[in-house]
Image (cartoon, grey):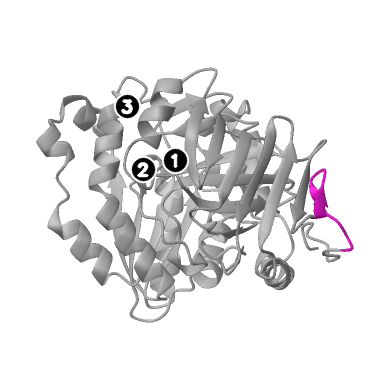
Amino acid sequence: MSDPRSQRLADVVVNYSLPLAQGDTVLIQGPALAEELIVELVRAATRVGAIPRVRASVEGTDEAYLARASDEQLDHLPPWALDEMGSIDARISVVGAWNTRELTGIEPAKMARRSRAAQPLMAQFMERSAAGELKWCVTAAPCEAFAQDAGMSLDAYADFVYRAGWLDTTDPVAAWKTYATRLTQLAEKLAAVKTLRVVAEGTDLTVGVAGRTWMASKGTHNFPDGEVFTGPVETETTGEVRFSFPAIMGGREVEDVRLRFEGGRVVESEARSGEDYLRQMIGMDDGASILGEFAIGTNYAVEEFTRQILFDEKIGGTCHMALGAGYPDTGSTNASGLHWDMVCDLRSDAEIHADGEPIFRNGRFLREFFAADLSVPT
C-alpha cells in the first residue's frame, strides 16, 4: 500500500510548485526505485490536463557507462538533449539512489569531462528558466540509501522528508503561500545590500552583491524548499571560507573544504579528504572557480545534515555557496559545467554583516533587520 503522503507531495508539486496547466508537456525523470512517487506525479499531472513523459533510470547504468566511456563518448552531447530542453514546458526531477557511492571508483577527470560536455545543456536550462519559458522542480523520494547516509531508519527518513515539506500540516499549500510572502519580503530587503561578509570559525569571506537580484526559494523550483539566494558579482569574492559539512558531488564526499578567494576566484583549496577531486572539479573550466550562487538557508523544519543537498542547503541557520554556474535571473553571468553547493553552518558563533552592519547572528536574522517569523507556518 502506498504512503498517502507521496500523493500529497505529488499534488503540491504539480499544483503549487510548478503549477502545471492544461496542455503543458512535462518531463518526469528519476530512478525506478521512486516508482510510487513518479506514478503519483503522473496521476496529478494528468488530472490537470498536462501531458507527462516519464524517463526512469535503472540501477548501475551510470557507473557502467562512466567506467568504460572513452574521451570521445564523454565529450558527446546528443542533439536530442538540447532539442528536448528547448521544447518541454516543465520538468520534474525526482532524486533517489540505490547506492550513493556508486561512482566513487570513477576517475575524477571523467566526471569533470562529462560535466564540461553538458555545459551547453545547463546554460540552455538556466536561460529558459530565467526567461519564464521552463517550469521546473526538484523533489525527493525517501529511499534506503538516503536513509543510511542520514543515519536514520527508512521510516524515520520518510518522516523527515515529508516534515521538511510541511506535508504534516493541515494545509501545506496555505503554509507555503504564507511562507512565500515572508521570504519574498526578505529577498526585497536584501536587494539593497552591496556587500555581505560571513564570519565564522575558519571563515571571513566577503562577497559583492550590488545590483544583483535576490530570489526567494519558496517551494517552486525545489520541494521542500527554504532559502534566499543571489549570484555574487563575479570579481568581488575575497577572503577565506571553511565549510562545516562535507561537500558531496557525484557520489564523492570531500571533507573539511577550505577555499581562499582573490578577485572572485579560488586561489587556494584544501580538504582533509578528497582534495584531488576538489581541485579537479574547480579546474574543470574557466567558470568553475567562481561563485555562481550565495544563499542563506531558512527552512527551520530541516535541522539535520543528511548528505542530500536538496535538504542540507535549506537547513535553517546555514549559508551555502555554489562554485560554478550561476542563475541568470539573479544577474549572474558565470557559466560552467559545474554547480557545486557547499554548506557552512552558522548556527553557533557566526555572523553575517551587510555593508558593515550585522544582520544575522547564530542562525537567525536580527529583528532590527528582518522581524518576520520564518519558522514553519501553522
**Residue segment shown in magenta:** 357-368
Q: Is residue 352 left or right of residue 292?
A: right
Q: Which quadrant of the view contains residue 149?
A: top right
Q: Residue at x 36, y 67 (%)?
A: 127
The answer to whether any part of residue 166 appears in the image is: no
Q: Are marks 2 and 3 in contact (CB under 8 Å)?
A: no
Q: Quadrant of the C terminus?
A: bottom right
Q: Which residue is mark 2?
A: 31
Chain-order first, disc 2 or disc 1 = 2
Q: Residue at x 28, y 23 (%)?
A: 107
**Distance from Cα at disc 2 to Cα at disc 1:** 6 Å
The answer to whether any part of residue 129 appears in the image is: yes
Q: Is residue 364 left or right of residue 268?
A: right
From the viewer's perspective, is residue 340 above or below residue 91? above
Total labels drawn: 3
The percent coordinates of residue 238 (x first, y second) are 59, 44
